[in-house]
Amino acid sequence: MAPLAPRSPLAARRSLALTAVAALSMGSLFLTQPAFAEEVAPVEQAASDAPSAETLDAVGAAEEAGAEIVAFGVTASGEDVVVVTEDSIATPKGEAAVEMFAESAGAEAARVVTVTEAPIAFAASDVVGGQGYLGLDSAFDAFSCSIGFAAWSPTGDPALLSAGHCAPLDNMVLSQPSQDPAVGGPGFTVVSGTPNLGTFGFYQFGSTGGAPGQAGDLAATDISVITIDPASGYIPLPAVTNWRSAGPSNDSLAGSVLPVIATGPPAAGEVSKSGRTTGFTTGTLNSVDHVVDGWANISGRWVRGFSSNVLAAPGDSGGAVLRGNTAIGLISGGTVASPGVDQWTWSTSLLHALPQTGGYEVALDLNAPVVSSPAAGSSVEAGAAITGTAPGSESVEIAGVGATFTVPVTSGAFSFPAPGTSGDFTYKLTAVNGHSTSGFTNYALTVLDAVPEPPAAPAVTSIVAGDSFAHDAAPMGVAGAGVTGAAVTVKLSGAAAATYSATVANEAWAVDFGERLAPGSYELSVTQALGGRASEATVVAFTVAAAPAPGNADADAVDNGAETGSDGTKPAGSKTRPALAQTGADAFAPTFGSIAALAVLAGGAAMIAARRRARS
C-alpha cells in the first residue's frame, strides 16, 4: 500500500504539550511521513525426499491410537527420531501407538523425544496488546495510538480494544515495532506490504450518543473496538507485549509477552501498562492519593476509571493496563511527571467500559484443564468421578467419548463421571471462558467390567434375637431367607464356635449343626455373597439354658401305668421311671432334617412339637 500522506500540515494540529494542570488525551500525532522498510528476499531451501506413503499412513494410525506425533525424521547422525507430546504417551496405550508408528515407518529403533505441547506457528500475522498503530482522521491528519487487548465480538469474531478517543480513523496499519518510540525509534515507519488493520466497529469517548457526559455518569467511558479486516490475516493473541522482543517484523512483539488470563477491577497495588510510546512500564495505584473508581475530565469529556502513577505519554492511548496478568483498563489520559511531581495517569476501567460495547469481551489465555484424579491411565469402575482443575475458566468441554458435553467449573474445579460401560477411553478436555478456549488435554483411562451392588443381608427366621432355649430343645441348625443362588456363610460363636455354608434355593437356606447346641450364650453372624460381592451381616444372639439339677428319686417317681391295689399300693414287681421335665406327657423333638425340609418348602424354619396322652 502507498505511504500515508497527510494532506494538511502536521504543524497546524493541536499542541501535544501536557501540563500538570490540564489532562489531555494520549493519542499522538505523526511527526514524520511514514517510510517503508525494505523487503527481505526469501531464502531458498534445499530439496529433500518426501516420506513414503507407508510412513504417512503410520502417522495417521498412531494419532488415531492416541499418540500425538509432533515431528519425525532423522538426526544429523542419521538416526531415526520421533517427536511426540508428553501427555499423549503417558499411558501404555500411547506408548504402544508410538511403537506401532516406528514399526510401520520402518524405524523400530527410533529415538523418542517428547515436548510439553504441540508447536504453534509463529506467524507474521500475530497482533498483541501494547502494539502501536497509525491512521488518518477525516481531515487526513495522521495519528498514532496503541492496541489494548485482543477481544471477541458477541458472535465470537476476533477484534481489538483501544481508546475511544483514538476513533474514528481510516487506513489503519501497524507501525514497525523496532522503529516505535518505545525502543527509541522515530515512531512512524510501516513495514512494506503491511495490510490494513481494520475499521472501528464501535467507539465511545464520554457518554452515549456522542455526549461529553458529566461527573457521576455511569455510561461515561473511553473505549473503542477495532473490527479486524478479514483479508489482513491478523490473529489477535491474548497477551500483552513487554517490548523486549521488538524487531523489524510486525509480529516480533509476540516474542516476549505477558499472557492475559483474566479480566478484573482495579485495586491498590502494582499496575503495569504497555504502549507504543513508553513501552512496558510499572507503577502503583496507592490507597491514599489515587482513585480506584471515579470520573476524570479528559479533554472536555468525562471518563469513568482509575488513576495511577504508571508512566504513559501521547501515543500510549488505548494501551493495555494490567494488574499482574489481569486486564483492568485502557490508557485514556494524564499529566506528565515533572521534578518533584509524580506521573498522574488516568485509565478507563474495563469493568465499566466493556458493557458499553454491546457484548465484546477480552480474549483470555486459558491453561488447558488438569485432571487430578484418577491419574491418567488408571483403571476405574463404571461411573467413577473424574475430577480436575481449570482456573480462570467457566466450563470444561469434554469430547472424544460419545457426544461432546460441557461441565461447569466451580472455584476452579470440575468433575464428570467415567463411562458407564467397560473399555479403554480417551477424552479431549478444553477449558472455556466466553469465546476464549484453551489448548486441549488428552486423558485416557480404562473402565473395568461393571461390578454388581452387594446383596442385602440375609434373613434368619428359625431363631429370633434374644431367644432362650431349654437344654433339651436347643437348636440343631438354623434356617432363613436370601437371594436365590447366593452363597450363605454362617459363623457361630460363643459357647461353641464353627462356620457353616449353604446355597440359597428358592429364596431359602438352612445349615445343620449336627447336634444340639450345649447350654451357653451364642451369636450367629450370617452373610450372603453374589457376584463376588458380600452382604452386610445379620447378627442374632440367643442362649441355651442349662439342664435342671437332679432331684429326689422317690419324689420324682411316677406311675408307670401299673394298676394300683385297693389300698392304693402298687402290685409287687411294679417299676417306676424318672419324671420327664415336661410332666404329664412324653416330649417329642423332631430331627433338624424335618426343620430344614420345612424351611425349604415354606421359606423359613418350623418347629413341631407333639405330646402323647398319658395312659388312663
Image (cartoon, rainbow, N blue to C red):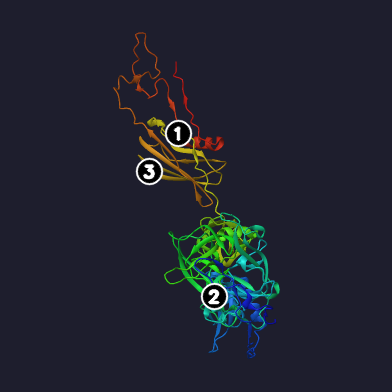
Question: Mark 3: which amino acid?
Answer: Ala
| x then y, percent, for residue 45 | 63, 90
Quarter-of-image position of residue 226:
bottom right
> Which residue is pictured at 43% across the width and 42% down the height?
525
Q: Which circle marks residue 277 in the picture?
A: 2
Comparing 217 with 417, the one in front is 217
Q: Can see residue 210? A: yes
Front one among 400 and 336:
336
Check disc 3 and report its element: helix, strand or loop. Answer: loop
Residue 404 visible to an observer of this rendering:
no
Across and down, in percent, residue 165 comes to 62, 66
Other-residue count near label 1 (Cα within 10 Å), few / some / many at <14 / 14–19 / ≥20: few
Name the quarter where the C terminus is drawn. top left
Q: Amino acid at mark 1?
A: Val
Marks 2/3: CA–CA distance: 92 Å
Between the C-alphas of marks 1 and 2, the distance is 92 Å
What residue type is disc 2 on? Thr
In the rendered image of this protein, does residue 205 appear above or below residue 585? Answer: below
Q: Earlier in the sequence, mark 1 or mark 2?
A: 2
Residue designated by label 3: 497
Q: Which quadrant of the rendered structure holds the N terminus? A: bottom right
Of marks 1 and 3, which one's residue comes earlier in the chain? 1
Distance of mark 1 from mark 3, alpha carbons? 19 Å
Instruction: Tell me, for residue 464, which label it has, or none.
Output: 1
Secondary structure category for the residue under label 1: loop
The structure residue drawn at horizontal position 44% and vertical position 19%, both measured from the top left corner, is 614
- Circle 3 Cα neighbour tier, 10 Å, few/some/many (<14 / 14–19 / ≥20): few
User: Which of the 4 image quarters holds residue 152?
Assistant: bottom right
Q: For the residues labelled 1 and 2, say whether their Cβ atoms are less than 8 Å apart.
A: no
Query: Which is more foreground, mark 1 or mark 2?
Result: 2
